[in-house]
Image (cartoon, rainbow, N blue to C red):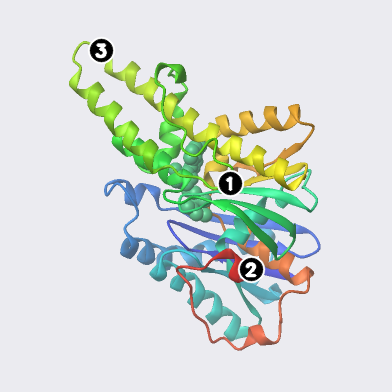
Amino acid sequence: MIILGFESSCDETGVAVVCTERGLLSHALHSQIEMHQDYGGVVPELASRDHIQRVLPLTQEALDGAGLAFSDVDAIAYTAGPGLAGALLVGASVAQSMAWARDLPAIAIHHLEGHLLSPLLAQPAPEFPFVALLVSGGHTQLMRVDGVGQYTLLGETLDDAAGEAFDKSAKLMGLGYPGGPALSRLAEQGNAAAYDLPRPMLHSKDLDFSFSGLKTAVLTRMKNLQADVSIDFPAARANLAAATEAAIVDVLAAKSLKAMKQTGLKRLVVAGGVGANRHLRAQLQSEMARRGGEVFFPPLSLCTDNGAMIAFAAAQRVKAGLVDLDASRSHAFTVRPRWPLDEI
Ligand code: KG4
Ligand code: ZN
């Protein structure tokens, strides 16, 4: 079965073609980062309008990349939530219209399930069961994954997401949007040991996270740096970036290892935009290897939002028998800007 998938929950328009037997055939992506940069964050109305303009050319690009025509498509998948309501509605209505035009099933996909299953697109792919660390701009969760559609929440952030901690700290340091990659780049020139930043809830017994205190600590350090004329500001800022990255990564790694211990599982999967962070990858790789476990990441290009993970999640759900293909032809639809993963 050939599935055409759409992602439009935030600031990336992604379209992909996945075959249930052969896997990912092609994907096309447009990032709106440049457009939102002047505003220091995503402007929802601009995001929706841009999705409208990009989605059809990207669909053509994805079909061309797979060497297929629209008439070859057997089902259509789209992100139904969580995300920005207007942005979600663009992908959902385009997907449903296309499905209606050819009487195809339209499959609503949870954005986080897309991230969660994206490491299965890598070689070698992890086998079930595994623990997943889901770290994006809006979410930080540890899940136990026993199979497609079988997700148990082990812990989550009580305030900011890890990506948000990167983005907000980067903003305080005067770096651009999105801050995660910029902060990480600057951190490479700094010395993490120069500042001792808090690692909130590092030793708490549960698997929850909290990052808002870290942001306050970064704010205080930044103010001190700006007021101190005797220091080399660029070098000090690079040190602060390195210390911030180390604090976030230490907490993510420690809680992931605690989840491995609690569940007794040996495989850890990292998904979501922050999964692109080199430091996090290296730290988890060495610590998991030391404990005789394995860690899996999606291909770097598929860490942040993309259509491939949505089409792929739909393919996995179809193969697992979780999609009622006849009911998916009704074409009445809604989007869910807030949608807990355990409600799918
Ligand atoms: O999964 P994603 O593309 O979008 C959401 O669903 O939120 O994640 C975006 C987040 C942003 O907060 C961004 O700053 C962060 O992922 N991010 C990174 C890196 N690349 C993206 N954070 C740290 N280091 C990176 N290399
Ligand atoms: Zn995402």
Which label lies toward us, 1 or 3?
1
Q: Amino acid at mark 2?
A: Leu
Number of the label disc, if any, that sits on residue 231 = 3
Name the residue rendered at 42%, 50% in the picture: 159
- What residue appears at the point 78 percent right and 41 percent down from the top-left corner? 266
The correct choice, above or below, for 159 with respect to 48 in the image is above
Sequence-wise, the earlier of marks 1 and 3 is 1
Label 3 sits on a secondary structure element that is: loop
Q: Which residue is mark 1?
A: 206
- Which x, y percent locates residue 161? 46, 48
Q: Is residue 156 left or right of residue 266?
A: left
| Circle count | 3
Residue farthest along the front direction in this orientation: 205
Residue situated in front as seen by the camera: 77 or 80: 80
- Few, some or many C-alpha atoms within 10 Å of disc 2 (few <14, some 14-19, many ≥20)? many
Where the C terminus falls, by quadrant? bottom right
Which mark lies nearer to you, 1 or 2?
1
Looking at marks 1 and 2 on the same chain, the residue that comes earlier in the sequence is marked by 2
